[in-house]
Image (spheres, rainbow, N blue to C red):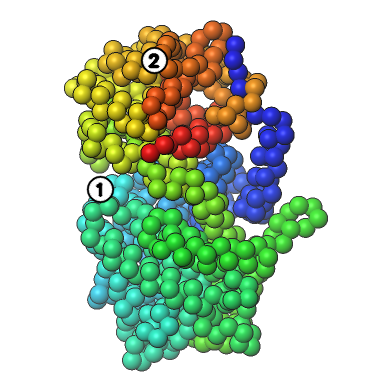
């Protein structure tokens, strides 16, 4: 029996590398400082903690370590009851700060499908529907802050607003979101520096408001940081064809240009009052520096900012690690240099003056700072690996696998092995891995042709539908086989992922696989009873080029393979071929008799911690990208 495994040295190198990652260390600090007590009576619905939760969510997606997800889940379970009511939340306050946690609700709904999270998010959506607005359509920051718009509020509300709209098909919302960014830029952007003032009062009656323009007197760094993160996060939810996309991208480019101009040349960090470097009392500030790094890096990754901005993000991140992250002899890391809070108006009154800002308390391990650092660290981890897949597109078949069902709104949506799906059946985490390595993920919802395959570097076909799964399945036809075979011979990388005998169409799929010397057997190997996961375990015991960091994997109820021609067994178990590779022309084919890398068995929520399906997915992702020869 052929088995494969990474060397002990490589395993240790991988484990130690992650242990030394600054994001991992600060995450450990966060979970220690704000532990999961299970006590709902102490739980509070606050935006401070939501920033930490979003940072931990990103770390979960980057590592597949479900400890971060489970921590966030338990925190939210303290706040949301089974009917979707939110502890300590009051809709009638119309406070935009209270909306930010809603992004975690949406994530949990997408992952678990639990209706309580949909209902809870619906309360926040109702708030935005009723939120008081300026005459130009901008949300008031809070009901008690009449006619005021703060940059902070754009981050608190707009990413949730856009994500909710994308998930529940409220397409008209995107025009509203675009307008709100445009309006605040019009009223708060300084024409000379390109920076935006902290707040704007439409009435011009507040003591802090300029009597001609209505904006506040200073450029507070964290307000600008919130605003930048709002832009890149909102753009991530925008439909590709929405006309507001380019308008927001243009705002982001103007914003990024202004931010880079005030970056401290000596440290790479940013000052609390952005346009007064070195002024008496001014200081380099951790949360804002983290937010700027996150915004610049993510803007480049998503393609909305030129690559030149990445150098500023790298300098900023290096400066943050040197200036703000302090690790003691006990190995515990802490984040210094975050201003605890800065606002406008209220009681005692905050006049927005320079003197006011620099006198606010600067603290260690403020949740807003720690959360923003986790977001920045996660984005820099992704950016670090982008060169491998740059310029390559990974195409997932949505034609032969084309299952649909109705979502909570009654709309018919795709499900089962698709990029967009975060629940157990989806490939969202595998898609995230491809994007981590710089590749673009795309889908093909029509029959493959020589023309539409040209843009694909890797083409993945998973579990083609049978009559049970689709009323009118798209079976693989001779023309499809010819187009795919020609594309492989020209240098494409084809991934064929089957399923067990009860859950896949075999006859036509094998017409394609047979061109490469592969046949999916009509069987059901490696059956597992209930949660007896060890029944589905394979152990890898030899160094392997495809899976160099993987030790123990889980695959259950799969079709084994029969090989001839160019195909060669890669992994066998008791004489059964589990995975195979074929080199055909300039191209490569990888085959396995199971969908394997769907979220249920990669995101860490279900399998025991010693299984390494996420590691296997990461290894195969890198190997597939390296095989591209076009």
- The percent position of residue 546, horizontal first and vertical second, equals 54, 29
The answer to which image quadrant residue 613 occupies is top right
Q: Earlier in the sequence, mark 2 or mark 1?
A: 1
* Outermost bottom residue: 211
Give the answer, above or below, for where 191 lies relative to 173.
below
Could you tell me which secondary element the residue under label 2 belongs to? Answer: loop
Location of the N terminus (image quadrant): top right
The residue that disc 1 covers is 169
* Outermost left residue: 472
Give the answer, above or below, for where 566 lies relative to 332.
above
- The percent position of residue 374, horizontal first and vertical second, equals 57, 55
- The percent position of residue 185, horizontal first and vertical second, equals 34, 75
State if disc 1 and disc 2 touch (CB < 8 Å): no
Mark 2 to mark 1: distance in Å?
Answer: 44 Å
Eye-nearest disc, 2 or 1:
2
What residue is drawn where x is 49% and y is 49%? 387
Location of the C terminus (image quadrant): top left
The residue that disc 2 covers is 517
Between 327 and 478, the one lying in front of the other is 478
| Residue 211 can be seen, yes or no | yes
Number of numbered callouts drawn = 2
Label 1 Cα crowd, 10 Å radius (few <14 / some 14-19 / many 20+) = few
What residue is drawn where x is 59% and y is 76%? 265
């Amino acid at each position: 029996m052929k088995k494969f495994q990474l060397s002990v040295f490589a395993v240790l190198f991988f484990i130690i590398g992650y242990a030394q990652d600054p994001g991992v260390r600060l995450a450990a600090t966060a979970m220690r400082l704000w532990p999961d007590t299970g006590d709902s009576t102490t739980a509070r619905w606050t935006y401070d903690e939501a920033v930490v939760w979003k940072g931990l969510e990103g770390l979960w997606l980057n590592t597949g370590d479900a400890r971060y997800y489970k921590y966030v889940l338990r925190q939210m379970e303290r706040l949301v009851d089974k009917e979707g009511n939110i502890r300590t939340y009051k809709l009638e306050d119309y406070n935009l700060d209270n909306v930010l946690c809603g992004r975690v609700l949406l994530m949990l709904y997408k992952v678990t499908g639990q209706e309580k999270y949909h209902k809870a998010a619906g309360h926040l959506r109702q708030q935005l529907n009723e939120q008081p607005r300026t005459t130009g359509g901008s949300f008031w920051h809070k009901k008690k802050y009449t006619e005021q718009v703060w940059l902070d509020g754009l981050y608190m509300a707009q990413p949730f607003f856009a994500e909710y709209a994308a998930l529940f098909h409220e397409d008209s919302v995107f025009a509203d979101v675009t307008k709100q960014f445009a309006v605040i830029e019009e009223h708060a952007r300084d024409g000379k520096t390109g920076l935006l003032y902290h707040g704007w009062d439409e009435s011009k009656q507040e003591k802090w408001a300029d009597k001609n323009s209505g904006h506040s007197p200073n450029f507070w760094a964290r307000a600008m940081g919130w605003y930048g993160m709002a832009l890149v996060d909102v753009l991530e939810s925008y439909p590709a064809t929405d006309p507001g996309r380019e308008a927001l991208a243009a705002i982001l480019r103007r914003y990024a240009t202004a931010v880079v101009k005030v970056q401290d040349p000596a440290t790479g960090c940013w000052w609390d009052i952005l346009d007064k470097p070195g002024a008496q009392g001014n200081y380099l500030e951790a949360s804002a520096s983290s937010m700027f790094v996150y915004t610049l890096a993510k803007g480049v990754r998503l393609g909305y900012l030129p690559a030149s901005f990445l150098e500023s993000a790298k300098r900023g991140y290096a400066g943050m690690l040197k200036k703000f992250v302090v690790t003691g002899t006990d190995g515990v890391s802490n984040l210094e240099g975050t201003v605890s809070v800065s606002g406008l108006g209220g009681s005692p009154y905050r006049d927005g003056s320079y003197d006011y800002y620099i006198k606010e308390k600067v603290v260690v391990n403020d949740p807003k700072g720690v959360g923003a650092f986790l977001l920045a660290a996660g984005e820099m981890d992704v950016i670090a690996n982008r060169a491998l897949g740059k310029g390559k597109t990974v195409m997932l078949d949505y034609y032969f696998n084309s299952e649909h069902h109705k979502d909570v709104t009654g709309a018919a949506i795709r499900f089962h092995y698709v990029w967009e799906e975060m629940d157990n059946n989806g490939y969202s985490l595998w898609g995230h891995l491809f994007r981590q390595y710089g590749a673009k993920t795309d889908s093909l919802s029509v029959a493959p042709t020589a023309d539409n395959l040209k843009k694909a570097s890797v083409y993945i076909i998973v579990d083609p539908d049978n009559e049970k799964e689709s009323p009118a399945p798209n079976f693989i036809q001779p023309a499809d086989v010819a187009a795919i075979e020609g594309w492989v011979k020209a240098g494409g990388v084809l991934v064929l992922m089957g399923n067990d005998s009860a859950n896949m169409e075999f006859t036509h799929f094998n017409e394609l696989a047979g061109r490469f010397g592969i046949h999916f057997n009509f069987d059901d190997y490696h059956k597992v009873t209930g949660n007896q996961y060890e029944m589905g375990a394979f152990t890898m015991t030899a160094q392997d080029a495809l899976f160099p960091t993987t030790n123990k994997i889980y695959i259950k109820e799969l079709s084994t393979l029969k090989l001839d021609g160019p195909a060669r067994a890669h992994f066998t178990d008791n004489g059964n071929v589990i995975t195979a590779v074929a080199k055909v022309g300039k191209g490569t084919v990888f085959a396995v008799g199971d969908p394997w890398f769907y979220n249920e068995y990669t995101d860490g929520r279900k399998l025991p911690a010693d299984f390494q399906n996420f590691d296997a997915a990461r290894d195969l992702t890198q190997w597939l990208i390296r095989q591209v020869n076009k």
